Image: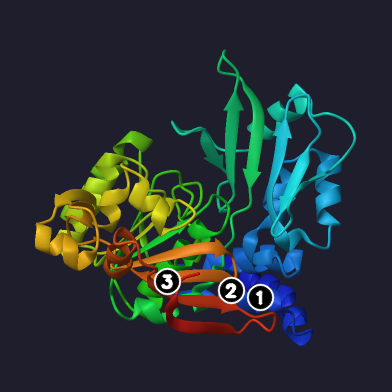
Amino acid sequence: MRSSLLMSVVTSVITPAIKSKSCCFMSLLHYPPLMTASYRCFRARSRLSCCNSHADDDMRALFQILPCDLRDTLLCDPSQDQLVEVILDLGCLPQAHYINDSGRRYLRDTEVSMEEIQCVLKEIGQFGGDNRAGIEGTLHRISAIRNRKGEVIGLTCRVGRARGQIDMVRDLLDFGESILFVGRPGVGKTTVVREISRVLSDELHKRVVIVDTSNEIGGDGDIPHPAIGGARRLQVLDPSMQHQVMIEAVENHMPEVIIIDEISTESEVHACRTIAERGVMLIGTAHGEQLENIIKNPTLSDLIGGVVIVTLSDQEARIRNSSKSVLERKAPAPFPFLIEINERDYWIVHRTERSVDALLRGKKPLVEVRRRTPQLQVVIERWRTKA
């Protein structure tokens, strides 16, 4: 009886959407393997209720935790698909930051109160050791700013996107080689690796394990978001344990691919090297503008093979026309590909070892430039000298 009633409700909701050629329901077909029948029905109803082009990102769930006037302002904003984050700081005007927008937009002319911050805190999950929380069932991230007493006095509400720009890198996945994404915060690295996890698990049928330190890739809660496809997710009790969970993933779960976001400590770098030597494909991200930043970073330089000072013979120094003490790469790079995400539609692809060797010798490396045109076509300029 309950089953027939549920089917009748779903049919009544979905049929009009199909007749009107709504795109909201069709987007669900992108993740069929992960959803049970009841969960699929729930997602269909919730996304059809939004019935807009932003449904995949669960934008309404993020807006729902905000003060009512801010919620109404954002819901009526035609550029909400470009929204990056909403900032609520005690005693300051609430702000919104958008993609390709150099400044921040103020959402009203009155300051944020402590009562409003407390109301937001009641609607989200618990903060972890990295001062990050989420909204269960979504990909959105809320980060806290605390005072000296430990009280939350500021919130950064970051939009989590379900779809990445996988077409910019889809061909590289067929090589089965590890890839490191480098870019400044907010440029879209996490969204890309989330979509890569789905493609590797669902389309290329790899055993994929995500080490999800802040629940940022798979979303908040114990059930991961459908955006990661059939990939499995290991949550991390404390950020300081991320490297341990990376090794645990290899030893206990037999992955072909491990995905790790925000590699930042020496122990995590060492874990990456260990995993790469065991024949496991790695997809990782690190903060930095370009490859040169990773070379100069003493903590992260081992991700590209490391840098060591070498003393050359007199003859070799004359051949190279250099001093006798030079910098050289000391080991194979655990990530054969390194991709600089300069902008969301402009990427630079390095063959890591060749580019590092060229840079250490004072030469410009040969790279691939990948960009997306206004017509959404990906244009690849192969192996040209980096500007």
The residue lying at 68 percent from left, 65 percent from top is 55
Q: Are marks 2 and 1 in contact (CB under 8 Å)?
A: yes
Residue carrying label 1: 25
Task: Please identify the residue farthest to the right as the structure is shown.
Answer: 109
The residue lying at 40 percent from left, 55 percent from top is 292
Rounded to the nearest whole Å, what is the CA distance between mark 3 and mark 1?
35 Å
**Residue 274: image x %, image y %?**
17, 53
Question: As shown in the figure, which amino acid type bears the numbered disc 2?
Answer: Leu
Task: Please identify the residue farthest to the top as the structure is shown.
Answer: 149
**Residue 303: image x %, image y %?**
29, 54
Rounded to the nearest whole Å, what is the CA distance between mark 2 and mark 3?
31 Å
Q: Which mark is residue 28?
A: 2
Instruction: Point out the tag, 3 or 1, that comes first from the N-terminus.
Output: 1
Q: Secondary structure at mark 2?
A: helix
Question: As shown in the figure, which amino acid type bears the numbered disc 3?
Answer: Val
Question: As shown in the figure, which amino acid type bears the numbered disc 1?
Answer: Phe
Up-down: is 132 above or below 229? Answer: above
The residue lying at 39 percent from left, 68 percent from top is 364
Q: Are marks 2 and 3 in contact (CB under 8 Å)?
A: no
Q: On the image, which quarter does residue 351 sit in?
A: bottom left
Q: Is residue 361 left or right of residue 80?
A: left
Q: How is the image coloured?
A: rainbow
Instruction: Point out the tag, 2 or 3, that comes first from the N-terminus.
Output: 2
Residue carrying label 3: 349
